[in-house]
């Protein structure tokens, strides 16, 4: 490329970026620039994304854990095209073959007795539906969660989450209590006959991948049963193989009453989330149908894609790759921290979820920018902003893991 061509290209990019600043949030553009992500997401394929100049980067954000089967998965896209040619979205209030088959397939796929399903579109909506079901079924209003959680952007979900902008929106959902994560004494004191549900993520991905201890989650399960409260687990980011098993709750030998699952159900190819719950809770829906309405929930095209995605999950078993290569990535990241102890404070992770902690968010943003320059796209945590989370496709290869590790060393050396 000649000097004149490069200058022309840069001028075009700057003009596009100025238009983005005018069209979208200027603060968002500033934030992307601080992370070195001042580029247009263009082509995408497998574990990689490409900018407008054709430069590729390994995607370690993966749509917040949606693209477990890689970007632009060809099997899923083929199913999407076929379904779109044969059917349409259907009607949320009507039963269809696609909805029925999705429910049957999820029952087969999910560990435990989570036999019933209510599909939705976005993560927060799934949590809102879970909270409505918990309150409706138990006849109780109190919801208990733990500090450090991140559940989405809607009413119940935002109230339950730890975020520093809650005061911007006035009064949120009442009768929600937050207690310390991992503190069983606090849980024993809090969970009572007034509690509708205890809600948490087994792994707080956005909070430095903080994981619940085995004995803690099992004891919480017992407390909920004893007091008649429901256990709600949010596996939006940990589900569908991310932690080295189909779902993280398998590793605890704990079955929730309600599971919130995320966009990984369709491999990120089609917007779908939802909740799965036990047949006992279905009695509330039997008495009160359509308590949670969603125009595009259970979209018939999306159901077809989700069914095909679960077939692919079962065929490929990417949780095995997540377990094997996740351990390699975690060990390598700890080695980087050991070499640069003054720069990286700590490392946490499970499966293909690895988080690096820095002294502040300035350093975490700078580290993301350095990773971008070295071929890896990653993002800081939403709760622990001083951390950077790595969550590549579950189909990532050993060569791509080596490339990520190489970028980590280079970025840490330059920080």
Image: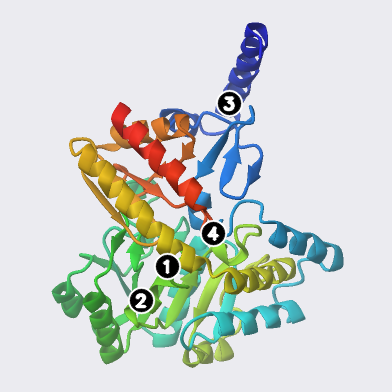
Q: Nearer the viewer, mark 3 or mark 4?
A: 4
Could you tell me which residue is drawn at 52 percent across and 51 percent down? 62
The answer to whether the residue labelled 2 contacts the one labelled 4, judged by CB atoms less than 8 Å apart, is no
Nearer mark to the viewer, of 3 and 1: 1
Q: CA distance from mark 4 to mark 1?
A: 12 Å
Name the secondary structure under disc 3.
helix
**Image quadrant where residue 350 sits:** bottom left
Mark 2 element type: helix
Neighbor class of circle 3 (other Cα within 10 Å; few <14, some 14-19, many 20+) is: few
Is 371 placed above or below 199 here? above
Give the left or right position of residue 334, taking residue 230 as reference.
left
Which quadrant does the C terminus fall into?
Answer: top left
The residue that label 2 is drawn on is 251
Whether pointer 2 and pointer 1 mark residues with C-beta atoms closer than 8 Å, the reply is yes
Q: Nearer the viewer, mark 2 or mark 3?
A: 2
Of helix, strand and loop, which one carries label 4? loop
Q: Is residue 373 left or right of residue 342?
A: right
Q: Residues within 10 Å of mark 2 (few under 14, many from 20)?
A: few
For label 1, the residue is: 244
Tell me the CA gap for discs 2 and 3.
47 Å
* Residue to which mark 4 is pinned: 68
**Alpha-carbon distance for marks 2 and 4?**
19 Å
Q: First in sequence, mark 2 or 1: give its number.
A: 1
* Residue 98 image offset from top left, x and y in percent: 73, 77
Are the residues tagged 4 and 1 within 8 Å (C-beta)? no
Q: Looking at this rendering, what residue extends furthest in the right direction?
A: 86
Report, in whole angstroms, how far the alpha carbon at label 2 lies from the one at label 1.
Answer: 9 Å
Q: Residue 270 falls in which quadrant of the image?
A: bottom right
Q: Kindly give the residue lying farthest to the top in the view shown.
A: 4
Q: Is residue 206 visible?
A: no
Estimate the x, y position of residue 299 in percent, counting from the top left.
Answer: 70, 68
């Amino acid at each position: 490329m000649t000097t004149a061509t490069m200058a022309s290209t840069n001028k075009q990019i700057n003009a596009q970026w100025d238009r983005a600043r005018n069209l979208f949030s200027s603060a968002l553009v500033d934030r992307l620039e601080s992370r070195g992500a001042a580029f247009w997401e263009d082509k995408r394929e497998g574990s990689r994304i490409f900018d407008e100049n054709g430069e590729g980067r390994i995607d370690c954000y993966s749509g917040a854990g949606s693209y477990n089967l890689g970007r632009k998965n060809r099997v899923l896209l083929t199913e999407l095209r076929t379904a779109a040619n044969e059917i349409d979205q259907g009607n949320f209030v009507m039963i269809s073959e696609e909805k029925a088959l999705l429910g049957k397939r999820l029952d087969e796929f999910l560990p435990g007795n989570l036999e019933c399903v209510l599909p939705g579109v976005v993560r927060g909506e799934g949590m809102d539906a879970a909270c409505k079901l918990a309150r409706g079924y138990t006849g109780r209003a109190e919801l208990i969660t733990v500090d450090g959680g991140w559940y989405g952007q809607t009413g119940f979900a935002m109230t339950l989450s730890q975020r520093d902008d809650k005061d911007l929106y006035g009064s949120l959902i009442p009768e929600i209590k937050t207690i310390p994560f991992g503190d069983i004494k606090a849980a024993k004191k809090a969970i009572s006959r007034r509690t509708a549900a205890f809600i948490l993520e087994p792994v707080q991905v956005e909070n430095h991948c903080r994981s619940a201890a085995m004995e803690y989650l099992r004891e919480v399960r017992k407390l909920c049963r004893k007091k008649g409260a429901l256990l709600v687990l949010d596996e939006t980011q940990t589900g569908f193989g991310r932690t080295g098993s189909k779902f993280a709750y398998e590793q605890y030998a704990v079955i929730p009453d309600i599971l919130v699952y995320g966009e990984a159900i369709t491999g990120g190819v089609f917007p779908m989330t939802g909740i799965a719950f036990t047949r006992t809770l279905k009695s509330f829906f039997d008495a009160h149908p359509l308590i949670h309405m969603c125009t595009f929930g259970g979209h018939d095209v999306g159901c077809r894609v989700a069914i095909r995605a679960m077939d692919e999950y079962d065929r490929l078993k990417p949780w095995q790759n997540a377990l094997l290569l996740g351990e390699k990535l975690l060990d390598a990241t700890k080695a980087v921290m050991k070499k640069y102890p003054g720069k990286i404070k700590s490392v946490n992770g499970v499966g293909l979820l690895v988080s690096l902690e820095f002294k502040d968010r300035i350093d975490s943003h700078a580290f993301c920018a350095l990773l971008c320059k070295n071929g890896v796209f990653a993002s800081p945590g939403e709760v622990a902003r001083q951390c950077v989370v790595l969550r590549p496709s579950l189909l990532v290869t050993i060569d791509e893991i080596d490339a990520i590790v190489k970028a980590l060393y280079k970025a840490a050396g330059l920080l």
